[in-house]
Amino acid sequence: MNRLTTPWGAFDLARFPEDPRDTLRAWDAADEYLLRHLQGTEDAPPTDLTGAVSVVGDRWGALVTALAARRPARPEHPVVQITDSYLGQQATRANLERGGITADRVRLLSARDTPPERIDVLLVRVPKSLALLEDQLHRLAPAVHESTVVVGTGMVSEIHTSTLKLFERIIGPTRTSLAAKKARLILCTPDTGLVRTPSPWPLRYALPADIGTLAGRTVTNHAGIFCAERLDIGTRFFLRSLPRRHGPERVVDLGCGNGVVGTAVAMANPEAEVTFVDESFSAVASAEATFHDNAPAAQAEFLVGDGLSALADGSADLVLNNPPFHSHRATTDTTARRMFADARRVLRPGGELWVIGNRHLGYHVRLRRLFGNCEVVAADPKFVVLRAVRK
């Protein structure tokens, strides 16, 4: 946990789930820059925050926590947070509670929820995914009016010409601030004369012919999920290497993305019950659409959550996992370690965890430590598929 000092006070903030070994903060210089800008400078007056304020992409709740503390409780105009991250949403809840901020001051929405009808101040933390930004701006544009204050923020390395063009095309004329501590602001003036067009997302495409059960099938991809515009080479390799099993069993597609892995298992073994789990609201929505389009008669459940925390001990026969190794811009194996430990807990004796990862990540070392065993099922120069059995 670290303390963020803002123009409106200091707040103890943490990521979610809290881990004393995690040295990453729940905010960065871009968040600080935006809050200073809202407070006002010698060259610009403070922003009027008494109206309908929406914050998009607030990663761990730092912006919403500071803004909610700044404003008096106004049930008719709570600060709205819109995020695609379940973990980010949970971090926001915890940080608000830690700051003594009551629930009536905020409204937490997912990226798939219906957006507010009116926005007087729109604050955008630029996401890593340009597609997610495009989808969010399209969905929010109808709520923006000519007097809406629109400010984006991000690190210099996150803001590109393509980023600014999206704001310009969907919202209105856009310029950037000077850089401060390697962060920058995006200042956008709404143009209500722009023709409002619907978001091009979700995107649907047909899978290649060389991946087995799902060959030629169509998948659905909401904006922001990993490799939303094509099948990534790691998943393609995993699909060719999946275990061939039959009979009733519970299979978990952990970190399911668009759900192609779990859907392939369900099509190959109609007696299996597949649980799709991801911390991204858009990923689970994509998986649900992909599954129902291709295996409508099979059994499945769809969970947005923190790994396998919602599943009981010893309740699964097979867990399939392609763990991420980035948390926003930071490279870390924290998520993979938690996923592997979760999988061991929910697997029955004899149950199996199958993992795909880049060779250089060395997942076999962690799996042997946790499970006491690990074998290589398939490998190529870039990827390796590993199998660990719960004893």
Image (spheres, helix red, strand yellow):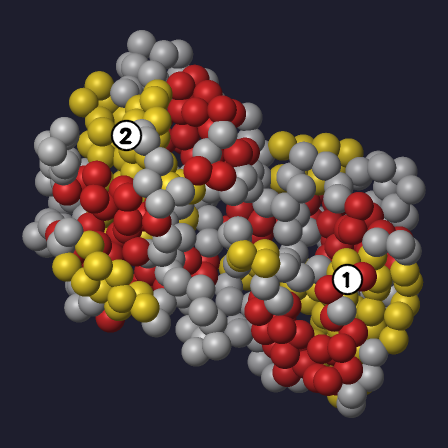
Please say whether residue 56 is visible from this viewpoint: no
Please say whether residue 303 is visible from this viewpoint: yes
Looking at the image, is 355 positioned above or below residue 33?
A: below
Residue where numbered disc 1 is placed? 360
Residue 264 in the figure: left or right of residue 147: right
Foreground: disc 1 or disc 2? 1
Q: Quadrant of the C terminus?
A: bottom right
Image location (x, y in percent) of residue 95: 29, 65
Residue 90 in the figure: left or right of residue 9: right
Q: Residues within 10 Å of mark 2 (few under 14, many from 20)?
A: many
Residue nearest the viewer, comparing 32 with 234: 32
Residue nearest the viewer, comparing 229 with 310: 229
Residue where numbered disc 2 is placed? 150
Residue 3 in the figure: left or right of residue 76: right
Three-letter residue code for mark 2: Val
Q: Residues within 10 Å of mark 1 (few under 14, many from 20)?
A: few
Query: What is the spatial separation of the Cα atoms under label 1 and label 2, in whole angstroms?
Result: 42 Å
